[in-house]
Image: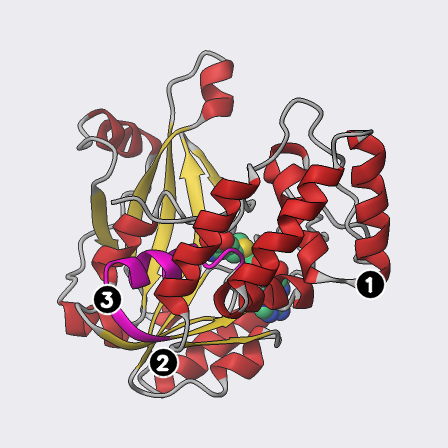
């Protein structure tokens, strides 16, 4: 199945979406994504007809507005992208910097789409003042207007009339979720020292996030969280605490390209946590989480090919 993608986005769950979808109820009334980014999971869910409604939210307002334009005004957006992309060819670099300057002044989401398509590796970067400061990709021209138009149209068909888009901080979304909702959270990576992450517009506090998940547990809300992970014997991100009684599903995300460059063959594994209410409904049963390096290595050597999930439970 080819699932359309609106734009490249750092940390997009596009590749992992088919695996994550295995941990969603067969039919969800409403899927809520408080940290939606490029909305990869919602788009994949809609493409398979697995949810009736969607609530997309991202604190980055121009990004949320861009998603709203993709869904509700695909023709207008496709046209403005084509004009910006065509204007590119006189002096491509100079044009990019002008669009970037204009975006930082106006926060016009149509300009953001062009920047996302044209910036280095499709990887957004923000400075301390929240200004977009990524450079243009000198080797690639960005998505062709016809391809962009087709992607936008396909996403609009999937989500129009059944999606609300907001730009709130995630706590305000969680305060308004209903019992029939399923919430998928993919928060920005928070360094252990609390440093700012230039990949995203904003970061979140680990302790506040844990407290919010505790409240969702009390309300019996079904939710999933992508959080920490590991590559080889190195972990990244801080695991969510056992006091939340989450069921951990480890997803093999593929071989680490950085490790491969250094001559090591390492699998990257991402954590997906299921809330107690969701794990119980789906009957995802606990097994011991393997902690030791040798066990991890063995786990990887005997592991099923890419695309299979291992299920384990953090034991309190
Ligand atoms: C890891 S990305 C999500 C990627 C997404 N799953 C995808 O597939 O593209 C995290 C997102 O959280 C957003 N964000 C950061 N702080 C936030 C907050 N306090 N409330 C809501 N969204 C926030 C960022 O703008 C970023 O788009």
Start-end of magenta stretch: 37-53
Q: Earlier in the sequence, mark 1 or mark 3?
A: 3
**Is residue 251 inside the magenta stretch?**
no
Mark 3 lies on a secondary structure that is: loop
Figure colour scheme: secondary structure
In the rendered view, does 1 fall on the left or right side of 236?
left
Residue mark closest to the camera, 1 vs 3: 1
**Is residue 52 inside the magenta stretch?**
yes
Percent from the top left, x then y, of residue 51?
Answer: 27, 71
Q: Residue at x 62, y 26 (%)?
A: 140
The quarter holding residue 50 reads: bottom left
Find out whether the residues at labels 3 and 2 contact each other: C-beta distance under 8 Å: no
Q: Quadrant of ligand 1?
A: bottom right
Q: Which residue is mark 3?
A: 50
Counting labels gives 3
Q: Residues within 10 Å of mark 2 (few under 14, many from 20)?
A: some
Do we see residue 241 in this rendering?
A: no
Question: Which mark identifies residue 106?
Answer: 1
Q: Which residue is mark 2?
A: 217
Q: Residues within 10 Å of mark 3 (few under 14, many from 20)?
A: some
Percent from the top left, x then y, of residue 225?
Answer: 40, 62
Q: Earlier in the sequence, mark 2 or mark 1?
A: 1
Q: Residue at x 34, y 46 (%)?
A: 16
């Amino acid at each position: 199945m080819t699932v359309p993608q609106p734009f490249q986005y750092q940390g997009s769950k596009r590749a992992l979406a088919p695996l994550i979808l295995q941990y969603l109820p067969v039919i969800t009334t409403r899927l809520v994504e408080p940290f939606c980014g490029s909305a990869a999971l919602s788009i994949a869910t809609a493409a398979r007809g697995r949810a009736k409604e969607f609530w997309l939210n991202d604190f980055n307002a121009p990004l949320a507005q861009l998603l709203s334009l993709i869904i509700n005004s695909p023709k207008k957006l496709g046209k403005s992208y084509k004009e910006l992309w065509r204007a590119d060819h006189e002096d491509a670099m100079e044009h990019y910097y002008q669009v970037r300057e204009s975006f930082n002044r106006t926060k016009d989401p149509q300009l953001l789409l062009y920047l996302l398509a044209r910036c280095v590796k499709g990887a957004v970067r923000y400075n301390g003042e929240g200004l977009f400061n990524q450079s243009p990709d000198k080797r690639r021209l960005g998505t062709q207007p016809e391809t962009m138009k087709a992607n936008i149209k396909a996403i609009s068909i999937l989500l129009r009339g059944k999606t609300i888009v907001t730009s709130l901080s995630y706590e305000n979304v969680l305060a308004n979720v209903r019992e029939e909702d399923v919430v998928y959270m993919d928060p920005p990576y928070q360094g252990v020292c609390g440093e700012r992450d230039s990949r995203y517009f904003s970061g979140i506090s680990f302790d506040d996030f844990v407290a919010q998940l505790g409240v969702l547990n009390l309300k019996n809300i079904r939710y999933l969280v992508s959080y920490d992970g590991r590559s080889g014997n190195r972990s990244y991100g801080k695991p969510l605490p056992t006091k939340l009684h989450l069921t951990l599903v480890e997803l093999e995300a593929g071989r680490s390209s950085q490790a491969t460059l250094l001559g090591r063959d390492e699998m990257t594994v991402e954590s997906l946590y299921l809330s107690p209410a969701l794990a119980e409904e789906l009957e995802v049963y606990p097994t011991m989480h393997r902690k030791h390096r040798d066990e991890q290595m063995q786990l990887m050597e005997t592991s099923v090919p890419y695309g299979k999930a291992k299920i384990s439970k953090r034991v309190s």
